[in-house]
Amino acid sequence: MVCDPPFARGDVRAIAPWLAMLAALAMPIAPAAQARPLVADAALEQRLEDLYQLAARIYAYDRAAWVATDALFAKVGRGAELSGVRGWVVTPDGADLIVTFFQGEGAQRTSFFVARTREGRVVEAERSQEATALTPTQQRLIGARDAAADEARRQGYTPCTQAPFNPVVLPDGGDDAPIRVYLLSAQTQNGSWPLGGHYLVRINVDGTVRDHRRYAKGCMDMQRPEGAKPAAIVVTHLLDPQPTEIHVFSAMTSRLPIFVATTDRKLWRVDSTGIAPIGD
C-alpha cells in the first residue's frame, strides 16, 4: 500500500470503511478487457471518461518521445553531435505523432532530427538534411514548456527522482486554447514507478500561466518487490474526490491495476481501460 503522508500518519480508524473493501484484492483480478461497471451519475461517468482520454494522450506523447529518443541515439549516437540539441517537441499528424528534436534558441530554433511514431513505435526517423525553421505551433508548444518550467521553479515543484522532469505538452484545443504542460517525475528504476512529483501547469495563448497544480502531497513510489508479481497496487489520494489522469497514466506505464482510496472514503479501480468505482 502507498499512502500520501497525512494518511500514513493518521488514525487507521479514519480509513476503516474502505479498508474492508480491499478484501476484493484477494479475489482474481478481472481481465482489463472485461466490461467496466456502469456509473449511475452521467456527469461523473463523462468526467471519468475524459480523465481516461487525457491519460491516454499523456501516455502516447510520453512514449513517442521515449522511442524517438532511442531512435536518435541509434542513428546519431550520444557524442558531440548532440551538444547543440536543446530539446524536442511532439505534434500530431493524423494518427501519428511527430517528434522533432531541435537546436538553437527562440526564433532561431531549427529541426535537427525528426521521428514519426505510430502506436508507440518509430516508423520513420532521419536527421534533418538542412536547418528547417520550426513551425509557429511548434514554437508555441516549446514556449509553453519553458513558461511551465519557470513556474515550477517559482512554486518549488521538484521531481521525486534524480532525473529531470519528463515534460508532456498537450494543447487543450485550438490555437486560442491553453496548453497543458505536465511535468512528470521520470522512472529511473525497473519495477518502481513514481506516483509523486507530477505537476500540471496550464499556459495561456499569450504565454502567461493560467493555473497550476500538484497531484500528490509528497514523494511516493509504486514498487514491485523483487521476484514478486503483484496483482494490483493500493494507494490513497488526498487532493481530489476521484482518481486523476496521473493514476491512469501510472496504471498504463506499470501495467498494473491501481486501487485508489479518495478523501470521501470511496475506493476506485484504475487500470489501462479507465476508472471505475468499487462498491456503492
Image (cartoon, rainbow, N blue to C red):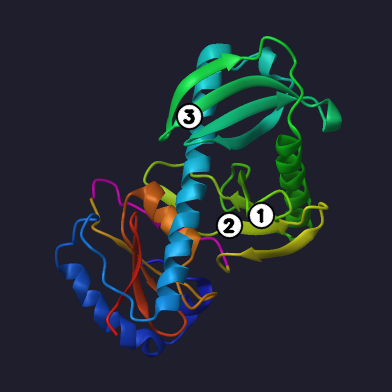
Q: Position of residue 264 (x, y in %)?
A: 44, 85
- What number is the disc on residue 197? 2
- Measured as percent of width and height from the top left, residue 46 is found at 44, 70
In terms of depth relative to the viewer, which is nearer, 244 or 128?
A: 128
Q: Are marks 2 and 3 in contact (CB under 8 Å)?
A: no
Residue 200: x and y in percent read: 63, 58
Residue 134: image quadrant is top right
Q: Please name the residue that numbered disc 3 is placed on.
A: 117
Nearest to N terminus: mark 1 or mark 3: 3
Does residue 125 appear in this view? yes
Based on the picture, tell me whether residue 227 belongs to the magenta stretch: yes
Graded by Cα atoms within 10 Å as few (under 14), some (14 to 19) or many (20 or more), the crowding at tag 1 reads: some
Q: Earlier in the sequence, mark 2 or mark 3?
A: 3
* Residue 213 in the figure: left or right of residue 1: right
Quadrant showing the C terminus:
bottom left
Specify the amino acid type for callout 1: Thr
Q: Which residues are magenta?
A: 218-228
CA distance for labels 2 and 3: 27 Å
Going from N to C along the chain, the mark reached first, 2 or 1, is: 1
* Identity of the residue drawn at 50% across and 24% down: 70
- The mark found on residue 158 in the picture is 1
Mark 1 to mark 3: distance in Å?
29 Å
Q: Residue at x 48, y 44 (%)?
A: 187
Instruction: Decide: is 195 above or below 187.
Output: below
Q: Are marks 2 and 1 in contact (CB under 8 Å)?
A: yes
Which element is circle 2 on? loop
- Residue 151, how many percent across, how many down? 77, 56
In the orientation shown, which residue stands out farthest toward the top? 129
The relative height of residue 17 versus residue 215 in the rendered view (above or below) is below
Q: Is residue 159 above or below residue 16?
A: above
